[in-house]
Image: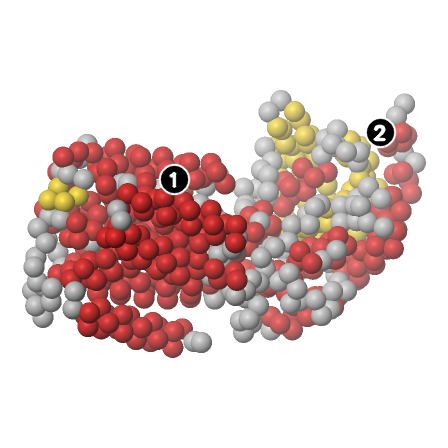
Amino acid sequence: MTPPLLDVAGLGKRFGGFVALEAIDLQVASGERVGLIGPNGSGKSTLVNCLSGTLRNETGQVRFAGQRLDGMAAHQRTRLGLARSFQLPRPFRSLTVAENLQIPIEYVVHARGEGRVDVPARCAELLDLVGLAGRGEELPTGLTQVEMRKLELARAMAAEPRLLIADEAMAGLSHQEVDDILALLLALNDRGVTIIMIEHIMRAVMGFSQRLVVLVAGRKIADGDPEEVIRNPEVERAYLGE
Amino acid sequence: MRGWTFLLLAVLVAGAVYAAAAAVNNGYVFFAGYVVLQYVVLATAWNLLGGYTGYVNFGVAGFFALAAYGTVAIEKLAPLPLPAVILAGGAISGLLGLGMGYLTLRLRGVFFSIATLAMAVVAQTFVVNWNFVGGSAGAFVIRPQFTAWFHIDYIHYLFLLMLVLCVIVLATARLIERSRLGDGFAAIRDDELAAEAAGVPTLRLKLIATALSGAFMGMAGAPLPYYVTYLDPPSAFSLSYAVNTIAMPLIGGTAAWPGPLIGALLLATLQQLVTVTISSAVNLLIVGLMLVGFIIIAPRGIIGWFGIGEGKLRRRKRR
């Protein structure tokens, strides 16, 4: 059996006396599409931050592609192939759209030492992929909310990741816009990128996920086939109450 | 324009400036010009950290004066040629910058700025209690009248060295802007968390910026004892160095190298003119008024009027 791409074992994180994550175990296979759901405050973003290196987990360990990530800085994890997008788009506002993509190309792809890519061509390709073709010379401040989220995904993709964690990439978008982002994530997965999608929009989660993981109050309460997980009584209780 | 072409052009301009100052044949031109050039170096050095990465350093006087006191110490221990003293000053303040960067890694925004101000106060206290360099009484340094070689007037020599430093610091700033390092700095300035997630080693880049910025400020400060001939802590660590140095890039624009250059030339020249025509006491008033005025009419500085520095790589050939 091939080892999982991402292997999280017993991960825990506290903020003072508050337990944000407790003994989280999670394995994600290469090429998989995993949905991660949970009510507000359940620890989804904390988990993303611990995986991507923004926060340090106090207990447990994270292995990615066979390598231990604990204590590793966020930029090193990105270089290893673990990229994330942010819940609220965080573009580099003084740089153009294309320059936003240029940063990970310069600092991740070129830093890997596996040869240099043609930067303008790669930027154009990524912008085309996310539906922002021809917008490379604009500043991000001129983009709409959905375009900013597409830029956020394109920037994560520019690092040529093996695993992409999309943190609520669809929050606040219209029906059509959700479909656009969903199609985009599925297209990325078709290209071989493993994706963990954190989302509240159940239509999107169910349409996307091959496997569903549920966090409640910092604990993983379900992990499995999406149809089965949403019928799990504990999950229903967490979402709908007693 | 390629780097070498720019450097050649900058050297030619510097040569023309020196020739023009010499043609006026008035010692005061060199005396006042030295201060203007010193501020070009300081403002550009400050901008390497403050403008490019967005970390506002209020401790300018600390970097500047510590190197000046380094010169006093070298002069007393074993006098060296001035270019070597300037390099030593750069090393002292570069190390100080590296240390400050390391100790303030987790501080951002106003907290970082307060820490830099505190660093300058600590440096001043250290010098006040260091009797070898004169302590609170200050130190006298005898300025030779002429250089040993070529018999150049020493003030002309100081002016020339500061001119060389201007060329070096401006060429460095321009090189950084056009390099991967500059892209990383811009990413840190815009959003440090996103920069780190995009693969930018933010910690290493911040340390490079604090060390480089500190080193150039030190280089600007190292010749100071020979210029003033009497150095005492209150004037060497004067807060006005920080106020002027920060105001200049803000007035000229922080996004690209011409900003601090224009700001320093404008403000420092005006201050020198006012010093001889009205009083040096008016200098800080001028800074205040110009700062308020420019924040209103040119929030992105003078270069902002011409769209320089927007989408910083936009007009640049992509690698």
On the question of residue B194 being in view, the answer is: yes
Q: Is residue B87 left or right of residue B182?
A: left
Read off the residue under disc 1.
B116
Q: On screen, B277 above or below B312?
A: above
Q: On screen, B24 above or below B98?
A: below
Out of B131 and A2, give the one closest to the viewer: B131
Q: Residue furthest front?
A: B278
Q: CA distance from mark 2 to mark 1?
A: 49 Å
The amino acid beneath tag 2 is Ala
Residue A69: where, in percent of width, then height?
A: 58, 45
Tell me which residue sits at (74%, 32%) in the image.
A41
The amino acid beneath tag 1 is Thr
Read off the residue under disc 2.
A238
The C terminus of chain A - image quarter: top right
Q: Is residue A88 left or right of residue B203?
A: right
Tell me which residue sits at (62%, 72%) in the image.
A120
